[in-house]
Amino acid sequence: MGLLERCEELFKTSNLYEVLGTTKEATEADIRRSYYKVSLKVHPDRAPEDPQATEKFQVLGKLYVVLSDKEQRAVYDEQGTVDEESDALSQDRCWEEYWRLLYPKITLQDILEFEKKYKGSDEERQDVIQLYVQHQGDMDAIMVSAMCSSQDDEPRLCAIIQAAIDSGDVASFPAFARESAKKKRARRKRADREREEAEEMQKEMGLGDEDDSLAMMLQQRQKSREQNFNSFLSDLEAKYAKKTPKSQKAKRGKK
């Protein structure tokens, strides 16, 4: 059974982009990020209750090989077919090793270094503006979703958003422009409460240096905002994953 047929059987669609939850217009980085997130959900170690998890994981690996190779992707986009006899798909490969080669585990030091470069960067500005538009100016949702941010960063993030509004880059949403003082106080209280809980945990565990403090902050964030914390790590791993290992090109002349 070919790759497209296996996708139909396991994911209820033979469209490779739909399997990843993306579109034909997706960039290489988008494909890599989407593959990571979908493969993470069906990873055999994370979905032991799914009897088809291993098969899904393997099929996703082959799918990614096709879409991450410019020539193979071009053929699929134009003809809607994949070269099943290409070396990349036909060779016997350990897809777990391939996946881990693409996505090495993120360490605390990686997060520290990323945070140092990320804050104040143009990349952060673009991400904040994207969150602003996505959540239509709801600062509660923006602050929960913004990477590497705490309540202390709110004035800075608001300034980024306001500058984008003033320049005409984005519209002014009422949720942002007319946010009540009561809602702002409630957000501050929640943040203060989370900080106090994290500090209590630090004292109980005898932690104090900068790295340990960050570790506690991340643990607290995972406890109270698990979905967004996991999303942050997923984005970080997918975004800064190693480049796709070059596979041998699809064989030419097949019909």
Image (cartoon, rainbow, N blue to C red):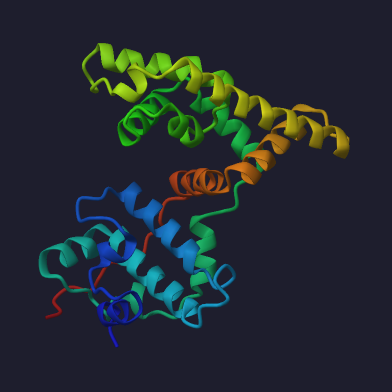
Side of 74 where 206 appears, left or right: right
Depicted 252 relative to depicted 129: above or below: below
In the image shown, does 109 or 90 lie closer to the viewer? 109
Residue ranking furthest to the front: 182
The spot of residue 114 in percent (x, y) is 55, 33
The residue located at (69%, 33%) in the rendering is 214
Depicted 128 relative to depicted 52: above or below: above
Depicted 59 relative to depicted 218: above or below: below
Viewport quadrant of the C terminus: bottom left
Instruction: Specify the quadrant of the image occupied by residue 229.
Output: top right
Viewport quadrant of the N terminus: bottom left
Asked if one can make out residue 25 in the rendered structure from this viewpoint, the answer is yes
The spot of residue 162 in percent (x, y) is 34, 14
Asked if one can make out residue 245 in the rendered structure from this viewpoint, the answer is no
The spot of residue 29 in percent (x, y) is 35, 47
Depicted 192 relative to depicted 31: above or below: above
Residue ranking furthest to the bottom: 1
In the image shown, does 109 or 187 lie closer to the viewer? 187
The residue located at (39%, 28%) in the rendering is 128
The residue located at (26%, 62%) in the rendering is 17
In the image shown, does 127 or 150 lie closer to the viewer? 150
The spot of residue 164 in percent (x, y) is 29, 17
Side of 76 where 215 appears, left or right: right
The residue located at (27%, 80%) in the rendering is 84
